[in-house]
Image (spheres, grey):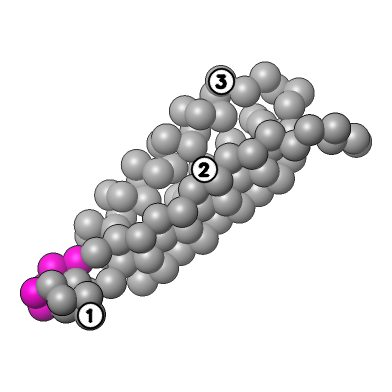
Amino acid sequence: MSWFVSAIGKSQAVKSALAEKFGEIECSEPEQTIKNNVSAAIALALSYYPANIAVEVSASGAQSDASYCGGEKGEYINGLSISIEPKWSFVE
């Protein structure tokens, strides 16, 4: 399975929106645990942003059977991409 979330706006609004989006995504294990940890890491990072700072966040992941890459059938590999970027000169 694969998943993707993104949001742009003031940091605390982005944090809330992403928590909701992450909560709507159900994955099989171990991808579910990995996704939940990504969600927690992003929330932690955003909790240190001042409330008036705009930020763009995107995160995605995909789980595949490792046999496609030379591993054993029933083993898994997970790819992740996470980006948290402040938006300088953001105007409302």
Residue of label 3:
48
In terms of secondary structure, where does tag 2 sit?
A: helix
Name which residue type carries label 2. Ala
Q: Residue furthest right?
A: 92
Name above or below for residue 53 compared with residue 74. Answer: above
Dot 2, how many residues are within 10 Å of its Cα: few (below 14), some (14-19), or many (20+)?
Answer: some
Horizontal and vertical percent position of residue 62: 37, 65
Tell me which amino acid carries mark 1: Tyr
Check disc 2 and report the residue beneath it: 19
**Residue located farthest toward the front when viewing the structure as drawn:** 70
60 to the left or right of 75: right
Residue at x 48%, y 37% (from the top left corner): 42
x, y percent for residue 5? 55, 55
Give residue 50's mark. none
Choose mark 2 or mark 3, whichever is in front.
Answer: 3
Q: Find residue 90 and report its horizontal and vertical position in percent.
A: 84, 35
CA separation, marks 1 and 3?
40 Å
Residue at mark 1? 68
Write down the quadrant of residue 54 in the picture: top right
Residue 25 appears in the figure: no
